[in-house]
Image (cartoon, rainbow, N blue to C red):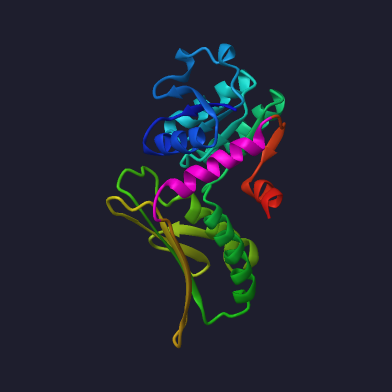
Amino acid sequence: MKIALLGYGKMGKAIEEIAINRGHEIVLRVSEDIEAYNLDELEIDAAIDFSIPKAAYKNITTAFKHKVPVVCGTTGWLDDYEKVTKLCKEEDSAFLYASNFSLGVNVFFELNKKLAHMMKGLDDYAVEIEEIHHTEKLDAPSGTAISLAQQIIAENPNKNGWQLDHADKDEIPIYAKRIKDVPGTHTVSYESKIDTIEIMHMAKSRQGFALGAVIAAEWLKDKKGVFTMRDVLSSLF
């Protein structure tokens, strides 16, 4: 496969290493304005976007206009998600967004949904989410934490939303911490007067995210439409 990297920071470099080890060719590394590059002449099979929130929308939509499928792991731009998916369909391209590409985190998502379903009738337990990331992460809370909260809300009719740090009784509080060199830790806790129930995922490096993104790009090649990591995982397990 010929892969374009939209964003060439630490994640981009980790993706590059794994992609090359899996036999792929990196034909483009975008670290500035994507429109400065000629995408048509490169015959790109898929682009992987791990850029920054203010660049993601332009990167993705420009790729669509050149019929390049996009795997995106950038968070903090999702106010434009509906516009992106609409353009993807109009351009007959392919798009796969995930707040977290780690295969372990996607198993964690499934555990979170199951636990939320089991806890929804137990009113003595208060739920909260904590996420810890490296100091270079620009958005808070993380997209993964938001996904976890949304899964809990879908299972619990008494929860209407989430808030960062301070939440009302009908909302889920998400606490975001930024610590140097922490790839990502997410904890979902249910607290009562008598005990605590907790599930946690702790990333040890960026390699898990990078591997998942490359696997997603491999899966997305030659497809049309809008997909999620659940679609990818259904083909693996």
Q: Percent position (x, y) of residue 202? A: 42, 60
Asked if 88 appears above or below 116 in the picture, the reply is above
Q: Is residue 182 visible?
A: yes
* Residue 7 among magenta residues: no
Q: Is residue 168 visible?
A: no
- Which residue appears at 56% of the width and 45% of the height? 98
* Residue 220 among magenta residues: yes
Q: Is 2 on the left or on the right of 50, as rendered?
A: right
- Which residue appears at 44% of the width and 46% of the height? 207
Q: Residue furthest bottom?
A: 194
Q: Percent position (x, y) of residue 208? A: 48, 49
Number of disc labels = 0
Q: Percent position (x, y) of residue 24? A: 55, 30
As rendered, which of 228 and 189 lies closer to the eye?
A: 228
- Which residue appears at 59% of the width and 22% of the height? 44
Asked if 108 appears above or below 60 in the picture, the reply is below
Q: Which stretch appears magenta?
A: 204-221
- Which residue appears at 60% of the width and 40% of the height? 216
As rendered, which of 43 and 115 lies closer to the eye?
A: 43
**Main secondary structure found in the magenta portion:** helix
Q: Percent position (x, y) of residue 183? A: 38, 51
Image quadrant assignment for residue 53: top left
Q: Residue furthest left?
A: 180
Q: Is 135 on the left or on the right of 190, as rendered?
A: left
Q: Is 48 on the left or on the right of 132, as rendered?
A: right
Quarter of the image where the C terminus is located: bottom right
Quarter of the image where the N terminus is located: top right
